[in-house]
Structure formats: C-alpha cells, structure tokens
Image (cartoon, grey):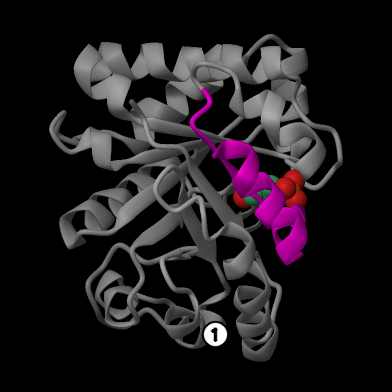
Amino acid sequence: MRKPIIAANWKMNKTTCEAVAFFEALLPKISGTCEQVEVVVIPPFTAIAACRPAAGGVGIGAQNMHPEPSGAFTGEISASMLLDLGVSYVVLGHSERRAFFGESDHFINQKLKRALASGLTPILCVGETLEQRDAGEVAAVLDRQISGCLADVEPSALPKVVIAYEPVWAIGTGRTASPAQAQEAHSLIRTKLSMLFTKEAAEQVRIQYGGSVKPGNARELLACPDIDGALVGGASLAADDFAAIVLAAG
Ligand code: 13P
C-alpha cells in the first residue's frame, strides 16, 4: 500500500508571519489524518526556519537545491543547509524552473542524486506542455524526463523518490487534467519506471498529480489507482482549502 502524500508548494509566497499563521490554522483541521496521509509544506527558503517549529507532524520541503555540496555558487542553497533547517523533502525539476531558469534533465538528475545521497526525499516534477500534448508527445516527453532525471539511480533507492506529474497546461490555469487523463499519464510513468528499474520498486513509488488541484476536484483525482497524492500550488495558500485536500486523501 502506498501512503498518500499531499504537499503544498507555496512557490514565491508568504512571509514568516504568514507562514506561522497558516500552520496555526491548518494543524487543528488535519489532526486526525496523520496516520493515513503524509502531509508536506514547501515554503520559500526564507520561511523554512520559522515553519519547522510551527509545523508539528507536517514535513517541511524546499523548492530547489544545488547539486554541489558547497562552494562558489552565489544565490544557491545546498542539501546540507536544508538538512540543517530540518527539511526532509526537496522539489526538483518544477516546470517553472525548467521554463524560467533553463533547468535540464541532466542538471535535475545531478540534484536528485545529491538529494538521495543526503537523505532528502526528492519530489521530481515531470509533465508535458499543451503543445506537446496536442502533438501526441505525452509518452515521449515523460519517457525522456523520467529516464534523464533518474539516470544512475539504484533500483533500491527508487522507492524513496516521489514523482509529481504536473502537466504544464494545468498549472495555475484552473484547467485540471481529467481523472482519466491524469491516470493515463501516471500509469505511463509507472510502466516506464518498471522498465527502467524493477516492477517491485515501481509499485512502491508515490506519484502525485499537480495542476489546479482544489478541494472540489481532489477526491476524484485521488481515487484513481495510480494517483498517490497531490502537489498543490494556488489552493495550498489558504489553510482551509489545503486542509480540505488533505482530508480528501484520508
Ligand atoms: P497550481 O495548483 O496553482 O496549479 O500549481 C501546481 C503546481 O505547480 C504545484 O507545484
């Protein structure tokens, strides 16, 4: 049985005070779900230190990291710096980083291997653009991203990786993938994983759906057999909405 994992990607939102207030509102609403659902909040770097003591049993993630352990990389953050703050998860290869900051599958692969070696749980984002979907390239894009980003990962390490299928056309657009579209993509991803690694390892990987997840659509998405959680952007900024999505997974 794969434990559902619901994560809040706050992107470039919330000051420290806003972040702490969010947890004060969230925790009482989700107190009964900790056993059944893994809940993660991924604040901007600047709010992580304030979030950790406020977060109770909620895991804390970071939105990015650099593959090198230290050195002359102005503006970057290393795995050990994240661990130092009590971070357990790191989002890698988000489509906004691929599109706005030119991140390649190879660079994401370097980060992912460093995250695994450091004991962080990578949340690896993959997904096609609308143009690629319209051109019938969904399977090819997912194949390329999965094999590139997971190159040289040992089958024994695979179950530690969380994958987030985030179709770019559904992010921040209010246009959610239908449960059938999402399930089809998740199943393609799992099949690809079993070809690259082992069937047993692929069966253990949690695959989140991300892209305009809201309280109103979470339940039907999460009911699909290969959808093991959600990576939530906009709707994770309000504690009420995020709590409702967590409860939909419980
Ligand atoms: P939205 O939920 O705002 O569409 O964002 C999804 C996302 O990018 C999460 O990483």
Residue 244, magenta (yes or no): yes
Determine whether, in the image, residue 84 is placed left or right of residue 218. left
Q: Quadrant of residue 90?
A: bottom left
From the viewer's side, name the closer residue of 35 and 49.
35
Report x, y in % for residue 172. Answer: 80, 47
Which residue lies under the disc numbered 1? 46
Q: Is residue 82 above or below residue 154?
A: below
Determine whether, in the image, residue 75 is placed left or right of residue 121. right
Residue at the (60%, 22%) spot, across then down = 223
Residue at the (52%, 20%) spot, across then down = 186
Q: Quadrant of residue 216?
A: top right
Assess disc 1: are there few (<14), some (14-19) or many (≥20) residues with their C-alpha within 10 Å of its C-alpha.
few
- Magenta residues span 227-250
From the viewer's side, name the closer residue of 199 and 22.
22
Considering the image in quadrants, where does the C terminus appear? top right
Residue 83, magenta (yes or no): no
